Amino acid sequence: MKTKLFIDLEFTGLHQATTPISLGIISECGKTFYAEFTDYDRTQLNDWLDENVIANTWVSKHKPISSMGSVYSDDLRWADVHVFGSSDFIKPFLIQWLSQFEEVIIWSDCLAYDWVLFNQIWGHAFNLPKNIYYIPMDICTVFEMKGIDPDISREEYCEIETFREEKTKVLRNDFQSIKHNALWDAFIIRECYNKLIKS
């Protein structure tokens, strides 16, 4: 049976030349991978991205970092990994983290850009690691199939206040505003999926 991985990417705009800023992944069993890219195109940033995405990055603000890149893992099992660096620096750590799962299926939210950028990490869709199922799933479709407006606030739908303490467990920080942090958004996607499947 495939392990569900819930992913979110933050990026420099809704256009063809967009570049990834951060990647968050949380498995159905709670293992996390979070990366902040240093090679995104800063010329594409605008005030909204600065205030809502860059302001909610985490590794570069809370950990000592090297110009070459840095990686932090909470244990030797690679359950929770945080990486800061270029795409080339991040890629081997992502490969290692993904290798703990025999087979995975990717879930996201409005995933058109996320999926293309995720594939770009590998250089081409045909280069995806063999354990990743090549067809991603989108919770937007599930909302529509359940008769729920796909534009609904995800935080309201999954009743974020009922698990507010999970914030510290997932992100290990005290952000007051954490929407548009890729790991937090991946967590919200997972919680929406769990509620949708039960309804």
Image (cartoon, rainbow, N blue to C red):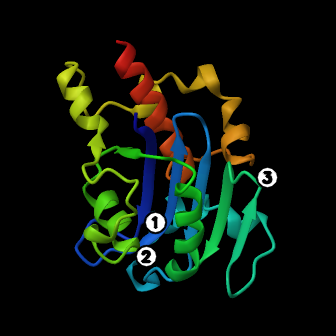
Give the residue type at disc 1.
Answer: Leu
Q: Residue at x 58, y 80 (%)?
A: 89
State which quarter of the image contains the N terminus: top left
Q: Mark 2 or 3, which is nearer the eye?
A: 3
Residue 7 vertical position relative to residue 116 in the rendered view, above or below: above
Q: CA distance from mark 3 to mark 1?
A: 32 Å
Q: Residue at x 58, y 63 (%)?
A: 96
Q: Earlier in the sequence, mark 2 or mark 3?
A: 2
SS of the residue at dot 2?
A: loop
Residue identifier under label 3: 75
Label number found at residue 49: 1
Give the residue type at disc 3.
Answer: Asp
SS of the residue at dot 3?
A: loop
Residue identifier under label 2: 45
Q: Residues within 10 Å of mark 1 (few under 14, many from 20)?
A: some
Give the residue type at disc 2.
Answer: Leu
SS of the residue at dot 1?
A: helix
Tag 1 and tag 2, C-beta contact below 8 Å:
yes
